[in-house]
Amino acid sequence: MKLFYPARLTLFILLLLAGINVCSQCSMYPVPFEQRVTQAAYIVQGKVTEQHCYIDRATGYVNTLNKFRVSAWLKNYSADEYIYIITLGGVYGDKAMVVTPALQLDTHHEYLLMLEADKHVLDDEQFRALHPSAMQLMTYADAQGSLTNENNLYHDLYYKTPRPETKLFAEISRMTGQSAVKPSGEPFVPREVIQPANNGITAISSFSPNPTNAGTIVAGDQLTITGSGFGAAAGTVFYSNANDGGATFTASGVASDNVSWADATIVNKVAVVAGTGPINVNGAMTSGTNLTVTYSHLAINSTFSGFGSTTRQRYYLVNKNSLGGYTFIYNTSFAGNTAAVAAFERSLLTWRCNTFVNFWRDNTTTSSIATAALDGTNIVTFDASLPVGVLGRATSHFSGSATGGCNLANTVWYTNEIDVQFAPDPPVAGFTWQYGPALPSGAQYDMESVATHELGHAHGLGHVIAAGDVMHYALSNGSAIRTLNGNNITAGTVKMAYSTAPLCLTPSGVTGPMAALTAVSCVLPLQLADFWGERKNESANTLRWITDREVGNSGFYLQRSTDGIHFNSIAFIAGTGNSNQPKQYEYADIQAGPFPWYYRLRQVDMGGQTTYSKTIFLDGDDRITARVWTKDAGRTINVFTKDIPGTSSALRIVNALGQQVLNQKLNNGNTEIPVGPLPHGVYYYQLHFNGRIYSGKLLLGTQ
């Protein structure tokens, strides 16, 4: 049964993030109803009456505090008529945040909420200081902790059939042993299902264009609806909800999305959360045919900067890393799971080489950050703090910047930071992650599919209702959706088209617009599985490394350093080029001498892009206190003297005629002396060090 909202919307919040206003099934697994009821500290029924956004100091999150008027307490009664529900995401001045999946509530219909205890986490501290006794709560199991009421039928994400209020309340009462009670203490009597009035609308005759796209500000995507009885005053256009597969209707909640309204014709910006299915006007008349939504773009609804009313604004992907886009950093634990990294990078490659979005990853370093926060790092991590029922989550932070007389052309909203989180393995009891490339079994969830979906949100795409589509609202266990279709590519390409165009202003901290990748530069050159080394003898080290995968790999420069900071390349080792199989490499540094060295790899792909490996350290030969030798075919003398306090050294070189050609004081440690200009021949040296004289002969010079 299709559900719909009341005929009019009353907005109590001026700054809303469009399209993130209902719960979704993306990257979630079902939490049994009995578990939610049992684990909830409170269960309430009621309606949001007001909302305001705030910034959490600990995380930098932009959250929404929803003032919730309680009609009934179903578990652990309180006399409070109002409680406050924390939901993630919102807009606060020139800051915004989108979290998917995450519960969002609106002010135009009722909910049944299963709530955790007041943990004083992520709450509005200023509001807490003013109202210390007011409960600030979050739902148990995030979006699954909310059931939407329409006409006294409650929609639960993983229940196909909505339940009447009478039946639902009776089920909860049997589990808790408690009856529904009003805040006043009087019994709450569950209500019967009602049928909505027609409100005088005669018919929806037609709508166009069909198909169209959701969430955009493009005039050609706006929906023109013709019919009769719409009324002279602007009302509400409802769309099939892409976040629940069309089980309910939804609207943007933004008055300015009504471009024009007359009794027989409406022009409306298609809501971000609109999916394929029938449309509805004013909650009274539903179309007899379906609107097809090919893709959705996420957008920001805001008054920033200088808008007279809340207005839909698109946001841009920009150059935040000076390489043309954004760089993801792996959490140390996540980086240690090479199969998980490979799955994520296949997803990254899918988007990079289809839409050419400039998402990069740095596999030369890791981070201890293990959760999402506005901290300047685009983290990819396993996160044990994710709510029950969540497999994966993308958290996008946005900033706004403006100049001059503000309008859509000179206000720049842009993605500032992106975090991607995954539930640790196993994500749920009885199920494990399938990291691929094998397909998941019925007892597995597919990591690559979840990663590809969440990176789609990071790219700026919303949900659609289209089974088999990467951005489809749901993914079940045993299912793999890893490949982009034409609509996904078009959606990403359109996003890239305006994100790569010159910005009307360059915000602080932004280098410029995003730089699109190419068919050559989009490939991730390789996945380095390991890099290590060992001392072979008193004068040589052996370096080894393994790649899991290579795509367009030109090769490796082996680099060496005495201090771990300043590196010089000592050899180039050609790569395999392209390979889906592990490849092992080895190089003997026969010029290492007895000294300690730092080593790293500088990998170069065929498109010229470079990445660096981790740095490793190999200790020197402690048995050697002093040594002299040549390298570079006699063009360089190497001198090593052990660092012994209170000692110094000096090197004297004479030719075959006994003529002195060099006399140089040296610092202890490793010293390189160029002697290429000397005439080619045999020379004799004396090294004075620590009260001893070391002597020998060398073949030096090139002339």
Image (cartoon, grey):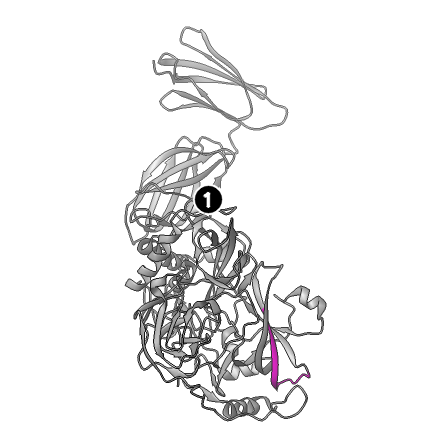
Name the image quarter holding the C terminus. top left
Mark 1 surroundings: few (<14), some (14-19) or many (≥20) residues within 10 A: some
Residue 346, by quadrant, is bottom left
- Residue 630 can be seen in this image: yes
Depth check, front residue: 100 or 696: 100
With respect to residue 241, does 299 lie above or below? above
Residue 313 versus residue 29 in the image, above or below? above
Total numbered badges shown on the rendered structure? 1
Q: Relative to 593, say whether 167 is above or below.
A: below
What secondary structure characterizes most of the magenta part? strand
Q: Residue at x 48, y 82 (%)?
A: 6
Across and down, in percent, residue 392 comes to 45, 66
The residue beneath circle 1 is 511
476 and 219: which one is in front? Answer: 219
609 relative to 174, above or below? above
Question: As drawn, is 52 to the left or to the right of 422?
Answer: right
Q: Is residue 485 visible?
A: no
Which segment did they paint magenta? 65-79
Asked whether, in this view, residue 119 is left or right of residue 214, the answer is: right
Front-most of residues 53 and 406:
406
Q: Where is residue 634 drawn, in percent x and y?
A: 38, 20
Query: Which SS class for mark 1?
Result: loop
Query: Within the image, what quadrant is residue 124 found in?
Result: bottom right
Q: Is residue 416 left or right of residue 54?
A: left
Residue 123 horizontal/vertical position (percent): 63, 67
Q: Amino acid at mark 1?
A: Thr
Q: Is residue 72 magenta?
A: yes
In the rendered image, the quadrant that contains the N terminus is: bottom left
Does the magenta run of residues contain 264?
Answer: no
The image shows residue 25 at horizontal and vertical percentages of 43, 73
